[in-house]
Amino acid sequence: MDHPNILIIMVDQLNGTLFPDGPADWLHAPNLKALAARSTRFQNCYTASPLCAPARAAFMSGQLPSRNGVYDNAAEFASSIPTYAHHLRRAGYQTCLSGKMHFVGPDQLHGFEERLTTDIYPADFGWTPDYRKPGERIDWWYHNMGSVTGAGVAEISNQMEYDDEVAYNATRKIYDLSRGHDPRPWCLTVSFTHPHDPYVARKKYWDLYNDCAHLDPTVDQIAYEDLDPHSKRLYDAMDAKNFDITPDHIRRTRQAYFANISYLDDKIGEILQTLKDSRQEATVMFVSDHGDMLGERGMWFKMSFFDGSARVPLMITSPDMEPGLVKAPVSSIDVTPTLCDIAGVDMSEVMPWTSGESLVHLGQGGARDTPVAMEYAAEGSYAPLVSLRYGKWKYNRCVLDAEQLFDMDADPHELTNLADVPAHQGTITQLRAKSEARWDLEKFDADVRHSQACRWVVYEALRNGNYYPWDYQPLQKASERYMRNHMDLNVLEDGQRFPRGE
């Protein structure tokens, strides 16, 4: 097909180290394993930024936060920035979103023609960090360790309610697409909020991991005084010193997290089965926005460049790409160019300002030797951090901290910083030059501070007097649903059925 249908399944905070070649063998994820078997699997895919809104804006635009301006979870995603939804819609696709994308600002569509649910997180500037107040915790929205101490079984939660709705709407939409009322090719994005904390799971999934051999982290907690500076900042931002985290808390948290992967697997299975039952074909992409440290080194959630936080699963099932494992480092900002390549859509007008590159050739036996870039400039940081993943190396830089250099082949847990080792000075000089050519950290910091200061003014102003929220309100036209008197019942019944009657 010149313009194939496209199904994008996105999840939230899924640790990519659990996907060495598709889901790890011990995970109860039969639907994802079946999808992996027919997919090009990217073993070393990295988020553009290890936090929800920046990661998602980068994923949708093919631009890093320093270019698109979405530095944190309360930074506006400008309507003028083209997303894959814009590119595909412009080329004749119908574009639809069911679920989370954490758009901040009055534009809650960003190229999607239809949105089936509201978002799970607020669309305003209320979660803006403030570099002018380093070390300040904003307790009502910053992560704290209550998600860990509160881990356990629940049959319903705020997030389960949301993801149940996301899956239901997605399957209804796939059935609707099968009716053929709209001849255009389609791109449906289904975006879940699990396995993002809080770490609670339904008992049927929890029980799958009662005897799991992976409930303890691989790397024990590192003493606070031995942590690198950014990890100390994150430890403080999580208010970790005020929580007594026991080994049982850690095991229960990881069990709930693994259970929620299985919960998602069931939801994904429903979606893929609906696609099959409705006899539709589609290119399928599975991806996460960022990872979760899951107690490794004593760290939790995301917000760092360590692989647990920054590495994400990415799998693509396309007739243009061969199933198999790709080990070359790639990025979530490569998604938009890849989707456009698969769909035969020209991005040349904006490519000079787009950092991502198509991955299609990697699924055809091709190679890649360009660095993968990451940025972080949100809560828990006092100045922007940047990273390059290049070959086997990961190089991290921040004006506040000493450089970090890790050999990811020899040291996958990133326990030995080689930045000061004499034998590696040639490597660090090379990577420092690449980093300095890409980033002016002084300007980056100034841009972030300007954005934060402006948003604090606007947020406080808009909260005075009448308040009109930007949160997306899904539109349902009841007068156009099911059977109404302006409809011909005979035409309606036949037209809404798939397959058609004899």
Image (cartoon, rainbow, N blue to C red):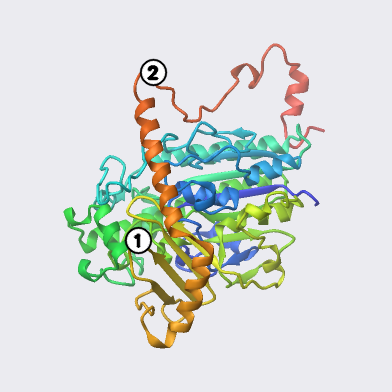
Q: Is residue 461 above or below residue 170?
A: above
Q: Can residue 493 be seen in this snapshot?
A: yes
Q: Is residue 276 visible?
A: no
Identified by mark 2, the residue type is Asn
**Secondary structure under badge 2?**
loop
Q: Who is closer to the viewer here, 341 or 64? A: 64
Q: Please give left or right for residue 139 compared with residue 98 in the image.
A: left
Asked if marks 1 and 2 touch (Cβ < 8 Å), the reply is no
Q: Is residue 68 above or below residue 465?
A: below
Q: Residues within 10 Å of mark 1 (few under 14, many from 20)?
A: many
Q: Does residue 381 lie above or below 397 as drawn?
A: above
Mark 2, residues whose alpha carbon is within 10 Å: few (<14), some, or many (≥20)? few
x and y percentages locating residue 246 in the rendered image: 20, 61
Of discs 1 and 2, which sits in the foreground? 2
- Please identify the quarter of the rendering in which residue 452 is found: top left
The numbered disc on residue 294 is 1
- In this image, 93 relative to 208: left or right? right
The secondary element bearing badge 1 is classed as loop
Q: Residue furthest top?
A: 485
- At 44% from the left edge and 48% from the top edge, which residue is drawn? 447
Residue to which mark 2 is pinned: 466
Question: Looking at the picture, how far across and down is residue 200, in whole percent?
Answer: 34, 48
For the residues marked 1 and 2, what is the alpha-carbon distance in whole angstroms? 42 Å
* Residue 360: x %, y % from top left: 69, 62
Give the residue type that dot 1 points to: Leu
